[in-house]
């Protein structure tokens, strides 16, 4: 195949039309392995997209549960604050009624906090699986083992094998790179949204500890919210390099949130907490129509309901 003379086509990220781009530097396998490579690549492509979309559904389920738990957490937090100033009427003469009520609210707040962190962990793991699937769409020729049977693997073992069949189509006119581009577009949305939701989770859970409030530690945003979280965030791409510096959350097409927004404010009002909950519900970095469009394009191209 003359790769310099035949540009491949990819789908534009904002339309369903195809456009010409520079060809892949990968060299096509010889005709016989290529005939075997394509079915193997098709099977893997279907599997990885199924994993990616299953993880997407898990993310939405966890995010929905997270908002419910965050709402319960906020209600318990505010009720404790207001309990100290409320007129209890005829109940005011009951021994320690206010203290007992606050203890129950504190217990409810702790339960909601634990549930919120559990939902957040599920969201992180879902995005992590989406990232892995988006990076596992290539199929490589396995190095010769003396067997006459051509075998394939998920890691490069042969020189100049980029796992894309030299840019040849896998389904219809779509190559490996075309599918990767679509997958990466979806994953990027969820990575941005996860960063924003992590900021909200860190803010919610920081309201639990009075000791943390007094210390006024401005690096709490990057503390580990569950065991192994930072390793997952590094895999996702939310930690810069080998450091523990969290990339600042931002809204797509807008500038990063100012550094002041990372300094957790603990003197939050009821209206501020309502904004937090609304922001969680809005999924501001997720373009639902584009997500549906990408899934439709992939399903039509594969002629398969994922």
Image (cartoon, rainbow, N blue to C red):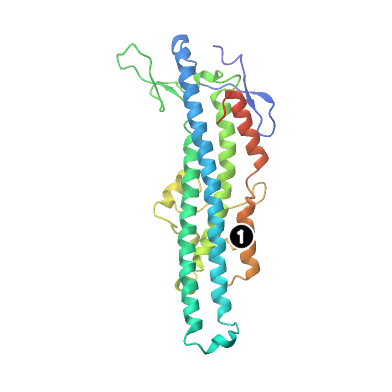
Residue 11 is situated, as x and y percent measured from the top left of the image, at 64, 27
Residue 94 is situated, as x and y percent measured from the top left of the image, at 50, 87
Residue at the far front in the pictured view = 90
Give the vertical position of 98 relative to 148 (above or below): below
Give the vertical position of 174 relative to 243 (above or below): above
Q: Residues within 10 Å of mark 1 (few under 14, many from 20)?
A: some
Please state which of residues 217 and 83 is positioned toward the viewer in this rendering.
83
Q: Is residue 33 left or right of residue 185?
A: left
Please state which of residues 4 and 117 is positioned toward the viewer in this rendering.
117
Residue at 49% in and 77% down: 102
Please state which of residues 289 and 260 is positioned toward the viewer in this rendering.
289
Image quarter of residue 161: top left
Could you tell me if residue 245 is visible in this image?
A: no
Quadrant (top left, top right, bottom left, bottom right) of the N terminus = top right
Quickly name the residue at label 1: 277
Residue at 45% in and 70% down: 107
Residue 86 is situated, as x and y percent measured from the top left of the image, at 60, 82
Residue 118 is situated, as x and y percent measured from the top left of the image, at 46, 55
State the count of labels: 1
Disc 1 element: helix
Residue at 45% in and 61% down: 114
Residue at the far left in the pictured view = 146
Could you tell me if residue 55 is visible in this image?
A: yes
Residue at 51% in and 60% down: 202
Quadrant (top left, top right, bottom left, bottom right) of the C terminus = top right
Give the vertical position of 98 relative to 266 (above or below): below
Give the vertical position of 104 relative to 278 (above or below): below
């Amino acid at each position: 195949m003359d790769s310099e003379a035949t540009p491949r086509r990819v789908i534009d990220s904002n339309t369903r039309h195809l456009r010409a781009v520079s060809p892949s530097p990968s060299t096509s396998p010889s005709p016989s392995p290529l005939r075997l490579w394509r079915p193997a690549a098709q099977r893997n492509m279907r599997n990885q997209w199924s994993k990616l979309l299953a993880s997407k559904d898990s993310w939405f389920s966890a995010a929905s549960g997270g908002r419910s738990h965050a709402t319960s957490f906020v209600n318990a937090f505010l009720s404790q604050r207001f309990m100290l100033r409320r007129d209890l009427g005829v109940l005011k003469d009951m021994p320690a009624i206010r203290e007992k009520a606050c203890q129950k609210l504190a217990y409810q707040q702790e339960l909601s906090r634990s549930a919120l962190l559990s939902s957040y962990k599920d969201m992180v793991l879902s995005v992590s699986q989406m990232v892995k699937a988006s990076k596992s769409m290539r199929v490589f020729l396995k190095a010769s083992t003396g067997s006459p049977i051509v075998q394939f693997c998920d890691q490069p073992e042969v020189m100049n094998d980029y796992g894309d069949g030299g840019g040849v189509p896998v389904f219809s006119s779509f190559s490996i790179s075309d599918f990767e581009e679509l997958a990466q577009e979806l994953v990027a949305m969820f990575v941005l949204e996860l960063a924003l939701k992590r900021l909200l989770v860190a803010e919610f859970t920081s309201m639990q500890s009075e000791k943390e409030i007094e210390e006024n530690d401005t690096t709490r945003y990057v503390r580990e919210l569950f065991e192994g979280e930072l390793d997952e965030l590094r895999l996702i791409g939310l930690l810069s390099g080998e450091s523990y510096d969290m990339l600042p959350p931002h809204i797509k097409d807008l500038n990063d949130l100012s550094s002041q927004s990372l300094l957790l404010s603990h003197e939050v009002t009821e209206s501020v907490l309502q904004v937090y909950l609304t922001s969680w519900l809005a999924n501001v970095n997720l373009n639902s129509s584009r997500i549906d469009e990408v899934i439709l394009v992939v399903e039509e191209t594969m002629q398969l309901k994922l």
